Amino acid sequence: MKLGILGAADIAYRRFLPALQKCPDITYAGVASRSLQKGQKFADDFGGKVYESYDALLQDSSVDAVYLPLPPALHYEWGKKVLQSGKHLLMEKPFTISLEETETLLTLAKEKELAVHENYMFLYHSQLKKIKKLISDGELGNIRLYRMAFGFPKRAENDFRYNKALGGGALLDCGGYPVRLALELLGDTTRVVQASLSQPTGYEVDLFGSAVVQNEDGLCAQISFGMDNSYKCELEVWGSKATLIAPRIFTAGAGVFPDLIIRSSSGKKHVELAEDDQFLHSIEYFALLIKNTLKRKTELLQKERQAKLISQIEKQRDICENSNYWSE
């Protein structure tokens, strides 16, 4: 199977291609770049062809799949063209910038019998599997609450994350991580019961926010995120017997040895885990989706559920803004 990259993004060069080289099921075909200099750097370091345009790559019948790391506002336009060209789609997060756009692409993927995958890499790290086992084995007791947070300090003013036209905003960028993790831990009945998004004066997008989600059993997760915050990348699982903290739940890339902390009345212990390549495993899962139609259907449902939760948070924000709840 041959894969091309649509756009010479930094994440494609630094992280995607080094991981792709370790995946025996997929061969790198080349990159389409609007900058010849950037495209040539990809070719010099990783081989492959430099396509003269995005359309040229999509017209190459030898390419079976496409990795799309463009700014979020371009995901729908070019994701749709990828699927219309009959190629499987590995999309950088967020999948699109609206529920309507996501549902359109998912419907098209079903019609074309193509695989789509959103690159939330942390889902495929062995760390999460270990956390789930500790929960299922009862080491923490009955789970009372989940807390998950992802935020980072302010980046450059020209960063696309602060540009509304490019699909910026904290919810779409860092907020998707804890939302997706909450869906993973709470299950398919997860819904938003409260949400808040903050857009300080002078900014055209939300910079930070929070939400509470709940499943049909009444189990809740408190979510927080921001891109003008001190760095936090944490999951807390509060049980009746003990509390588990994972300080690098979203960003434990290759070379990182995650450390889980378990606190109880008897003291504190550390569970040191092995390093893992979550980017590689995400690519491997994409290859599996291409081969396995049953898993492909499950993935489509999860993409839709994720998009609906994001949409519910946006609607809760709109309700708060259009009411007098906060008025004195």
Image (tube, rainbow, N blue to C red):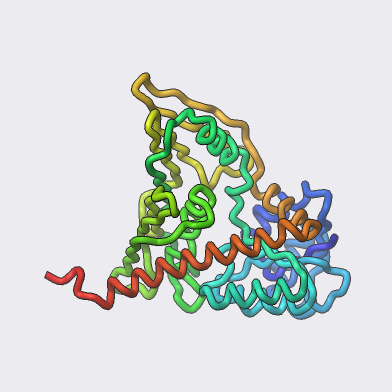
In the picture provided, is 255 more to the left or to the right than 231?
right
Extreme residue toward the front, this view: 217
Query: Which percent across, then down, holds residue 211?
Result: 37, 58
Q: Is residue 59 above or below residue 16?
A: below
Query: Which percent across, then down, holds residue 34?
Result: 69, 76
* Quadrant into which the C terminus falls: bottom left
Query: Which percent across, then down, holds residue 252?
Result: 56, 42
Q: Is residue 72 above or below residue 224?
A: below
Residue at 65% over, 60% down: 299
* Quadrant into which the N terminus falls: bottom right
Q: How many marks?
A: 0
Query: Which of 322 and 252 lies nearest the eye of the viewer?
Result: 322
Q: Is residue 153 visible?
A: no
Extreme residue toward the right, this view: 62
Query: Which of 201 and 260 lies nearest the eye of the viewer?
Result: 260
Query: Which of 35 and 215 lies nearest the eye of the viewer?
Result: 215
Extreme residue toward the left, this view: 328
In the picture provided, is 95 more to the left or to the right than 314?
right
Residue at 48% over, 50% down: 186
Residue at 50% over, 69% down: 160
Q: Is residue 133 visible?
A: yes
Q: Which quadrant of the figure has residue 154? A: bottom left
Residue at 32% over, 66% down: 198
In the picture provided, is 46 more to the left or to the right than 259?
right
Query: Which percent across, then down, holds residue 65?
Result: 78, 66
In the picture provided, is 276 more to the left or to the right than 178?
right
Extreme residue toward the top, this view: 266
